[in-house]
Structures are given as C-alpha cells and as structure tokens.
Amino acid sequence: MRGGVVCSLPVLAVVAILGLACQIVPARAPAVDAPPAAAPAPPTPRLADEQAVASFYRGKTVRFIVGFPAGGGFDTYTRAIARHISKYIPGNPTVIVENMPGAGSLIAANYVYAATRPDGLTIGNWIGGLILQQVLGAQGIEFDARRYRFLGVPVPDNVVCAVRKESGFRSFSDAINSPQPLILGGSAPGSSTDDPPKVLAAAIGLNLKLVSGYGGTAPIRQAADAGEIHGGCWAWESIKVTWKAGLEAGDVIVIGQVTERKLPDLPNVESALDLAKTDEARQLIRSGIIVPSRITRPYAVHPDTPPERLAALRQAFMAVLKDPGLLEDAQKASLDIDPVPGEEVEQLVRELFETPEHIKAQLRALLLPS
C-alpha cells in the first residue's frame, strides 16, 4: 500500500446507508442535436462497501485526462490534485496526468465520454463552456453533459472586465453611455474571453468592439499594455494574479463584474446584474455567463461508472481540496480553492438545459457561428 491514510466511514454511517438504492443509466446517450428535456441525475450513493472499492483500486492506475496543454491553468490544478489525491482514494492507486489538447478541450471531453471504460479509472478535465455549447446545439459535441457524472470543480470562475486606465473607461456605465466603443480582446468563439462580452453587449447595452484571435489571456494582456486594445473579460481569479502589477499600480482598472453577488475583493465595482433592466436580460446573463462560469473547470467520469466508485471518487475529490499539502501547493502557484461539489455541478448542468427556449435562441444567435 502506498503512503497515506485510507479514510473510513464510521460504522453507524455505513449501516445507515446500506438501504440506499442506486441506478445505473444506459450505456449510450441519445443524439445530442435535439436533446430531450433534462432528467434528474441518479443520486450518488454513500460509500457502502469501502473494502470492495479499496480492493478494486489497489494496484491500479487512475488517469486524469486534461483537455489543454501542460503548463496552463487546467493542467496546473490537475497536477496539484493528482499529487495528493491517492491517499484519499480507497486502495491508494497510482495517479497520473495525461494531456489531450485540441478543439478547446472538446477532444478530451468526447474521449472520456465515448472511448474509455466506465470503471472509475479515468477522470476528465475539460472546459465547462462546452456544456452550454451542447445546450445551444453546437456541432462536434459527442457527449451528453446530463449523463456525465461530475466529481466537482476546484474553484468557480468569476468573470470581470478589466481595462488599461488610458482607455478612459472606469465602469460598465461608461461603456454603455460612451459614443466610442470599448475595445476588448478575445481568443475564439465559445471561449471564456469571447462569450461574456457578446452577452453583455446584448443584455446591458455595452458599446463594445471585440477583437478576437489572440492566443489566450496572456496575449490579450500584452495587447492591452501595448495600446492595441483596451482590455478584456475573463476570470478575476486569473486577472488578479497575472495582471497584479498593473492593478496595484492603478494602470489596470476593473470596470465591472459578472457575478451572482459582488466579490469581496471588488465591493465598489459595478455588477452586470444590477445594470440589467429586465428579467430577460438578467436571465441572459445568468444562463450565458454566470452558470457556465461556476462550472468552467469540471472533473468528470464516464456516465456508467459504478456508483460505489463514483461515491469514493467524489469523497476523495472534496477531501483532497482540503489537504494541507495541496493547499500549500495552491498558495505557491496562486491557485484559488473554493470547491463546488459534484452534486451541485449536476444541478447547474440541469439548470442550463432548462433555460427558457427564447433565451436559448438569443444565446444561439450571439454565441454560435452563423
């Protein structure tokens, strides 16, 4: 057995949960071009037979499949988790990380869903924006997010928009009322840099011009610092670290936040929800930005993973995000940790599929290629 402590449930808890029933869903999803109404995911059972799970995982290898290249944010989170999670999985398996970049992580998402065994030995990590793309009917998606079983998210993204002070913009209101457009950088349609500005323009009337095609948030920052564009919109968790010097010097200004509640770091920064004038506009912001942002970094296993292994992996995932060693690694790498449990991720996925049809139609027109 590898080093580490194998966590055990109290005897009374085990007895209490032996009566729980679980249901395994069918092997393949229906075509996703016209998805049926979302059905509640089967409940996650408690870990009823830890010894059986430990017997299965002992001597095995668990693979994390990351849909982005090594060195990026998704990869950094996954490698930190992989270094420490074995001690929390019964049987203490070996854990490795494999990168499978391509198509904005779509290759990895399709692979884990359709080309891996449902044995609890493969965990996928891909961008949650693909779930909204499925809801809207985007091409190339070969998974059904309603059937994926989610372990959780290490931290939700909170979208903000930041610009150089030379732009002259100090708030969303400035960008709504200015005759000159706010010029923001993006990377590609469907990305977390491109979709929020498009939704904000429709929902609250931002006068903006989106210049897409940059190779990521670092080139967007560099372009803003060089005066090519004014700034961009993406996760505050990233901006506050990577643009820290500019923020501290006052050269970079956060002009608005697209969050359910104002962030403690930004109490005086305008909220897009507060500026939305109609329920429809607020729904557009929630379905198009806020909910997808909470599930941007999901970890998921095959839909038909045995329920007792799913329960073990979910417990391990939440436990490792409290591990002192992981928290020390996260602090060194400036990674925020604020877990969203797998059950909540599945609720948010169902919410996206239940988006009113007229809101879906607006988002489809805004976010999908014509």
Image (cartoon, rainbow, N blue to C red):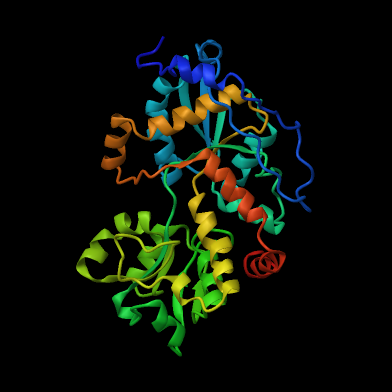
Instruction: Measuring from the top left, give residue 252's x and y in whole percent.
Output: 29, 69
For this orientation, the residue located farthest to the bottom is 179
In this view, the residue in front, 176 or 20, is 20
User: Does 360 appear above or below 154?
Assistant: below
Question: Which residue is at 66% across, 70% downward?
Answer: 362
| 10 sits to left or right of 285 | left
Work out whether 289 lies above or below 206. Answer: above
Say above or below: 78 vs 16. below
Q: Is residue 173 left or right of residue 351?
A: left
* Drawn side of residue 54 relative to residue 351, left or right: left
Taking depth in this image into account, of 37 and 143 the one nearest to the observer is: 37
Q: Is residue 103 visible?
A: no
The reply to whether residue 350 is in sight is yes
Q: Residue at x 26, y 65 (%)?
A: 247
Q: Position of residue 368 (x, y in %)?
A: 66, 64
Picture quadrant of residue 267: bottom left
